[in-house]
Amino acid sequence: MRKQIAAANWKMNLTYQQGTALLQAMVNADISLSENQAAVFAVPFPYLEMAIDTIAHKNFFFISAQNCSDKKSGAYTGEVSAEMLKSISLTYCLVGHSERREYFGESHKMLADKVSICLTNGITPIFCCGEALQTREANQQNVFVETQLRESLFHLTEAELLKIVIAYEPIWAIGTGKTASTEQAQEMHAHIRSVLEIQYGEPISGQISILYGGSVKAGNAREIFASKDVDGGLVGGASLIAAEFIEIIKALK
Ligand code: PGA
């Protein structure tokens, strides 16, 4: 059975003190996950070690970075390498969030390199994809997302692909309060799975967790996660409020 994941993306929010308090509230919450479920927290770089220590004794809680460099090491001032993340025992990293693609010019090739360098360092990339509103309005979303997958993931071997998580995040639903309908989400998740199936075969595509992101909240998580091909969510705004994110974790299948 595919892993069901609730992933928090704090983005560039919260002070160190606020972040510590939020994680402590999450750890103290009455949440018991099974082997097949995970709660992941993508926190800012300076908080990673604190976060890893805070969740250390909580079963099936994990910490993620929000980004890493596509380069191995060297003269890249301000960048953080996957090897550095591995050296603090980090297990997950977001790759290719639409905000990184849009504001920091991250290309398909750069993201392909980031996925590979994460895997080389034993870090699970949560690979984000998703279309803008005008692409959806032109009914080009399927081909758009397929290109994102093809260009940044199809260099992977079967064994490598099995180690990644995908997050479908329609840009028009991120931080807007608009979510994709359950039908729109299920339809795109099924499409993503079929694209993977054509390239890698059903036994592989059937095992990849595909998360939905875009205005997931306590009030809509259960309905969104219920769809057959939706294996949890990547959550921004609502993950900054303990009570909201606790309910989102509890909504996992
Ligand atoms: P949102 O963000 O939940 O605030 O829409 C989701 C994301 O960008 O990962």
Image (cartoon, grey):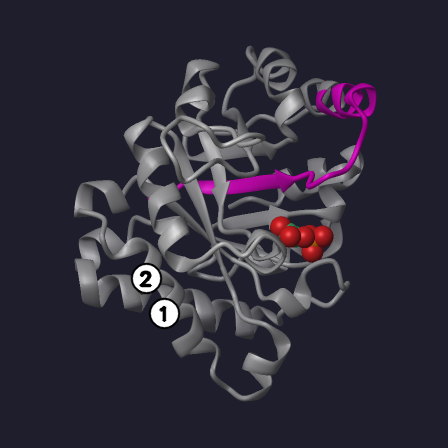
Residue closer to the observer: 106 or 211: 106
Judge whether residue 140 can be spotted in this image.
Answer: yes
In the image shown, does 32 or 21 lie closer to the viewer?
21
* Magenta stretch encompasses residue 157: no
Q: Which residues are magenta?
A: 1-23
Question: Which residue is at a point 60% across and 21% down the rendered structure image?
Answer: 48
Question: Quick check: 221 above or below 120?
Answer: below
**Who's the residue at 68% across and 41% down the image?**
11
Circle 1/circle 2 CB separation < 8 Å:
yes
In the picture provided, is 132 more to the left or to the right than 229? right
Residue kind at label 1, given as amino acid type: Thr
Distance between the Cα atoms at labels 1 and 2? 6 Å
- Secondary structure, mark 2, is helix
Q: Relative to residue 207, is residue 26 depicted above or below?
A: above
Q: Which residue is mark 1?
A: 147
Quadrant where the N terminus sits is top left
| Residue 215 image position (x, y, % from top left) | 70, 58
Q: Quadrant of residue 132?
A: bottom right
Which residue is nearer to you in this view: 50 or 242?
A: 50
Q: Is residue 77 above or below residue 227?
A: above
Relative placement, left or right, of 68 versus 176 is left
Pointer 2: what residue?
151
Q: Residue furthest front?
A: 75
At x 68%, y 60%, the residue is 174
Q: Is residue 141 above or below residue 153?
A: below
- The residue located at (64%, 31%) in the rendering is 43
